[in-house]
Image: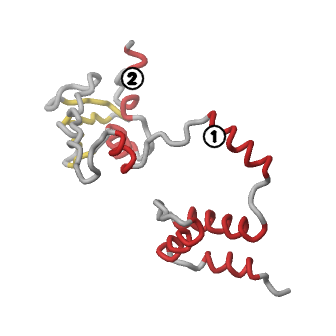
Amino acid sequence: MKPTPIENELLALKHMPPRQLRKRYADLYGELSRSCNRQWLIRRCAWRIQALAEGGLSERAQRRAKQLARDQDLRVIPPKDMAMALLDRPADVQQPARKYGKRTHDARLPMPGGQLIRVYKGHQYVVDVLDNGFAYDGRRYKSLSAVAHAITGGHWNGYKFFDIATSEESE
């Protein structure tokens, strides 16, 4: 059976690169897509092609969608150009960079320079606490769990392996 023109168009979407999909989206919707996600573009274009060819949502479905939309926040973060307009700032003015505080030291661990000691299967293991991780056997690790994995060869919660009380247990 010969595919219909709509089916041919939908099949063609699957073989388009994202750039062509964005152009097709703009042709179908009359606006540029903010997304470059290929799968999303294929789905949106396919829906629009079918809706134009066979008719969109029924009046009842449109009314229900509007009713649902009134009850929900559709966007949590407004588009950048809208946010700038709301703030009465030109879009080309950059906002100051956010300042993030330095990560505080985990109170469950010794201060950097300290050590954690664990006897496991008759052998004593010593781990040095660093500013940004841990050192064991001449190697650096980002987490205690990684150190525990290096010692045991299995997956462990680092705090449990070194018998350090979790924040829930210490409260």
Along the line of sight, the residue nearer the viewer: 153 or 16? 16
The answer to whether residue 22 is left or right of residue 68 is left
Q: Residue furthest left?
A: 113
Numbered tag placed on residue 99 in the rendering: none
The answer to whether residue 111 is left or right of residue 118 is left
x, y (%) of residue 128?
A: 19, 36
Q: Which residue is mark 1?
A: 69
Q: Amino acid at mark 1?
A: Ala
Q: Amino acid at mark 2?
A: Thr
x, y (%) of residue 88?
A: 30, 41
* Label 1 packing within 10 angstroms: few (<14), some (14-19), many (20+): few
**Helix or strand or loop: what does disc 2 sit on?**
loop
Q: Which residue is mark 2?
A: 166
Give the foreground label among 2 and 1.
1
Q: Residue furthest bottom?
A: 2
Residue 12: image quadrant is bottom right
The answer to whether residue 10 is left or right of residue 141 is right
Q: Residue at x 68, y 70 (%)?
A: 49
* Label 2 packing within 10 angstroms: few (<14), some (14-19), many (20+): few
x, y (%) of residue 20?
A: 51, 77
Residues at marks 2 and 1 touching, judged by CB atoms closer than 8 Å: no
Q: Residue at x 47, y 39 (%)?
A: 76
Along the line of sight, the residue nearer the viewer: 11 or 5? 5
